[in-house]
């Protein structure tokens, strides 16, 4: 397993990170334990969760993912071997704090304390803001439209950084990151941190895959020049890039079979591009999932590639992608498909 420096920190994280949002809904605790054991045995040292997990979010399951991870940490005694990342939910989610969630000082404090209890740990390595608390483009939204009634968001961002500084000083969190963020947002957090000697973001966790390369437009340069690595989520586009949903297939217990809300990558342009990528992989005797994952992991601005699975068989395939080097011919094929169908599912 390759390890990479996370931002400007002294943390070295595995090139593959284990995403856990299926724990507590699609996966039982025993299955979660088995996934964590396999990942750690294979060299993964980076685990990502969120206070809203599992997904889809529901009030009666909220926090179940954390509790499973916490039980695993308490049982295995591996806390010092793990880089643990979590996220505070942004505004608008009814299952968190009765829908009154925002990034106020009190909510940040409440989120951190509750996460620490569920995770059975004294500190969080990377605490992330799950999505912006301002008018912005995220979760597939393109075409930014200004809100003439919106207040200047910079004072609120400054206050967030001050709140996080308090928690860093208390030893409850070590580093901070963003998620579902824009280039303007990332640079504003960096600017205010430098100007006021506040915590500096070390990562941005955004979607990134063969069907959605929008990160490359502005944020890739931020990652490179500011040493703020991408934690790439949805590298298989909700499993679509495995090819298992092509021709209208809906495998039993698969995410898109169980939850019809996930349509981001299954519209016609995305399906056509997926077919092309799957065919390319098979032409070169590659597993489509492994090709898609290896491509993400190899990008120079990616700090870690967040994989997820519901079975150990899937997890093993995904983990094996870390050692795969794609040939020039495959890379040229990927770029040709992208040129003909750029970002079909942003």
Image (cartoon, grey):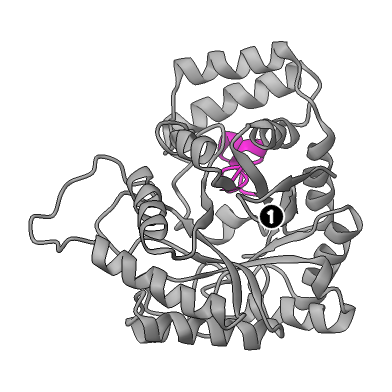
Q: Position of residue 241 (x, y in %)?
A: 62, 37
Classify residue 316 as left or right of residue 328: right
In-front residue for pair 52/26: 52
Q: Position of residue 56 (x, y in %)?
A: 51, 67
Q: Is 85 located above or below residue 79 in the figure?
A: above
Q: Residue at x 66, y 78 (%)?
A: 123
Q: Is residue 62 visible?
A: no
Q: Residue furthest left?
A: 148
Classify residue 27 as left or right of residue 110: right
Q: Residues within 10 Å of mark 1 (few under 14, many from 20)?
A: many
- Figure quadrant of the C terminus: top left
In-front residue for pair 47/270: 47
In-front residue for pair 340/163: 163
Q: Residue at x 48, y 41 (%)?
A: 266
Q: Main secondary structure of the magenta part?
A: loop
Q: Is 296 located above or below residue 151 in the figure?
A: above
Q: Residue at x 50, y 42 (%)?
A: 226
In magenta segment, residue 233: yes
Q: Is residue 313 visible?
A: yes
- Picture quadrant of residue 308: bottom right
Q: Position of residue 117 (x, y in %)?
A: 64, 88
Q: Is 294 located above or below residue 84 in the figure?
A: above
- Figure quadrant of the N terminus: top right
- Picture quadrant of residue 89: bottom left
Q: Residue furthest right?
A: 41
Q: Position of residue 124 (x, y in %)?
A: 64, 73
Query: Where does the magenta region start and end?
Result: 232-251
Q: What residue sits right under mark 1 in the picture? A: 308
Q: Residue at x 49, y 82 (%)?
A: 111
In-front residue for pair 135/228: 228
Classify residue 97 as left or right of residue 57: left
Q: Secondary structure at mark 1?
A: loop
């Amino acid at each position: 397993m390759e390890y990479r420096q996370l931002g400007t920190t002294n943390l070295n994280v595995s090139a593959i990170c284990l995403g856990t949002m299926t724990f507590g809904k699609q996966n039982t605790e025993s299955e979660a334990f088995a996934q964590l054991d396999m990942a750690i045995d294979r060299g993964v040292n980076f685990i990502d969760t969120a206070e809203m997990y599992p997904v889809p979010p529901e009030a009666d399951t909220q926090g179940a993912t954390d509790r499973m991870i916490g039980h695993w940490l308490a049982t295995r005694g591996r806390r010092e071997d793990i880089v643990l990342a979590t996220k505070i939910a942004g505004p608008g989610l009814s299952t968190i704090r009765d829908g009154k969630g925002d990034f106020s000082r009190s909510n940040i404090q409440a989120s951190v304390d509750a996460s620490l209890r569920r995770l059975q740990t004294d500190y969080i390595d990377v605490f992330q803001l799950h999505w912006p608390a301002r008018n912005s483009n995220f979760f597939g939204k393109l075409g930014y439209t200004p809100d003439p009634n919106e207040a200047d968001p910079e004072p609120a961002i400054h206050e967030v950084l001050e709140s996080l500084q308090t928690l860093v000083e208390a030893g409850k969190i070590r580093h901070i990151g963003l998620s579902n963020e824009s280039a303007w947002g990332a640079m504003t957090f960096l600017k205010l941190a430098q100007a006021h000697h506040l915590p500096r973001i070390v990562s941005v966790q955004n979607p990134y895959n063969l069907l959605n390369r929008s990160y490359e437009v502005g944020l890739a340069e931020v990652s490179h020049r500011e040493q703020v690595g991408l934690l790439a989520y949805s590298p298989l586009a909700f499993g679509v890039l495995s090819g298992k949903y092509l021709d209208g297939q809906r495998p039993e217990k698969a995410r898109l079979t169980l939850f019809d809300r996930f349509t981001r990558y299954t519209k016609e342009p995305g399906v056509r591009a997926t077919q092309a990528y799957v065919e390319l992989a098979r032409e070169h005797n590659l597993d489509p999932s492994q090709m898609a994952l290896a491509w993400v992991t190899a990008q120079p601005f990616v700090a870690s590639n967040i994989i997820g699975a519901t079975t150990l068989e899937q997890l093993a395939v995904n983990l094996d992608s870390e050692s795969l080097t794609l040939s020039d011919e495959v890379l040229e094929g990927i770029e040709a498909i992208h040129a003909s169908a750029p970002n079909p599912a942003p």
